[in-house]
Amino acid sequence: MMGIPFGFSPTQIFNFCVGKYMNFCGLHSRLVELDNGTTMECWMPKNHGARQTRGGYSTKKPSLVLLHAFGLNSHTWCRQVSSFSSAFDVFIPNLLFAGRSFTTNKARTEFFQAECVYKLLQHLDVQEFCVVGTSYGGFVGYRMAHMYPHAVQKLVISSSAVNMTPETDEAMVRRFKTKDVTEILQPHDAEGIRRASILAFYKQPPFTVPEFICNDVLNVLFNVNRKEKLELLDGLQLRKPDAPPLPKINQEVLLIWGEHDPVFNVIYAHRLKESLGDKADLVILKDAAHVPQAEVPWEYNKKVLEFLIKSPRETCFPSEGSIDRHKE
């Protein structure tokens, strides 16, 4: 039996174990070359493309795309894979400069990220799909819903203030007493990693995380492609003072937030709900901060599945009875 192919790195060991778990759940990682100088890595069903039929009806599941937060990678959805894969064909791309996704293109906006994800799905012959995006992934998901309304069926915006303004950055800087928002979103030392943990989780461990673990997370996650990731932050159009108004979208939307989110206060969720009107549902999860999908995964998964499965197009989505199988 082969050993783990690296030295003692807690973060790499975690990534190794998550990869094996995702394999166990029926997914595998694939690299796809696009036509715009970009290569994207995506976790996808192992049997994707094998169209099976039973009794004259296709057994292919509807498609669901999960988009991760800034500075992280596709592994952050590990607590959703089992639940969501029971009802959907799940696709989890690594956004640009995460995992093995990379581009020689100079574009750095969330529009370009949305274009790359769409091109990836087109290459995989995924024509229609729902999207769940958290934080930065929500920015990308919203742009996809606007740019490709024929493809995006439903949208889940998770802890993602797509209605943010330049004042949002200023408020975060004041709250966490840093010089710039990049110190919060792209930490450069062990203290920054600890601060990121406070942002992510409402319930903190009863001990100080050892510095060697913080430095390991820093080196494995945040220092790889650091220059390009900082360019992504600078290229985020939602943060620009001259950004145009947020465009309207026609899809049904679920807004799902941690009650104690210190990055994007729940007030952004309420404002977004008001802006989107009747087409949007809002769910606030207790005892959770910026990453409720990791902190309260059972409640998160249940609410997302209920929203995605509830559809007037009965032939497109599984029956509501299947939701009982998704408890973790």
Image: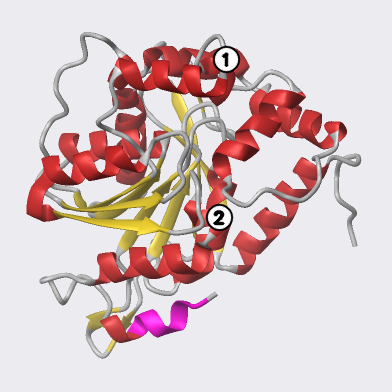
- Looking at the picture, how far across and down is residue 31, in whole percent? 53, 40
Q: Residue at x 36, y 39 (%)?
A: 160
Q: Which residue is mark 1?
A: 178
Q: Residue at x 53, y 31 (%)?
A: 101
Vertical arrangement, residue 325 with respect to residue 188, above or below: below
On the question of residue 315 being in view, the answer is yes
Residue nearer the viewer, 57 or 204: 204
Q: Residue at x 38, y 38 (%)?
A: 265
- Looking at the picture, how far across and down is residue 48, in whole percent? 42, 62
Which amino acid, mark 1? Thr
> From the viewer's perspective, is 223 left or right of 40?
right
Per the picture, the main secondary structure of the magenta-coloured stretch is helix
In the rendered structure, which segment of residues is drawn in magenta? 322-327
Secondary-structure class at tag 1: loop
Q: Residue at x 91, y 39 (%)?
A: 7
* Quadrant containing the C terminus in the rendered view: bottom right
Which class describes the residues within 10 Å of circle 1: few (<14), some (14-19), or many (20+)? some
> From the viewer's perspective, is 37 left or right of 102?
left
Q: Earlier in the sequence, mark 2 or mark 1?
A: 1
Secondary-structure class at tag 2: helix
Give residue 294's mark. Answer: 2
Vertical arrangement, residue 177 with respect to residue 157, above or below: above
Residue nearer the viewer, 212 or 133: 212
> From the viewer's perspective, is 3 left or right of 82?
right
Say whether residue 323 is magenta.
yes
Say whether residue 157 is magenta.
no
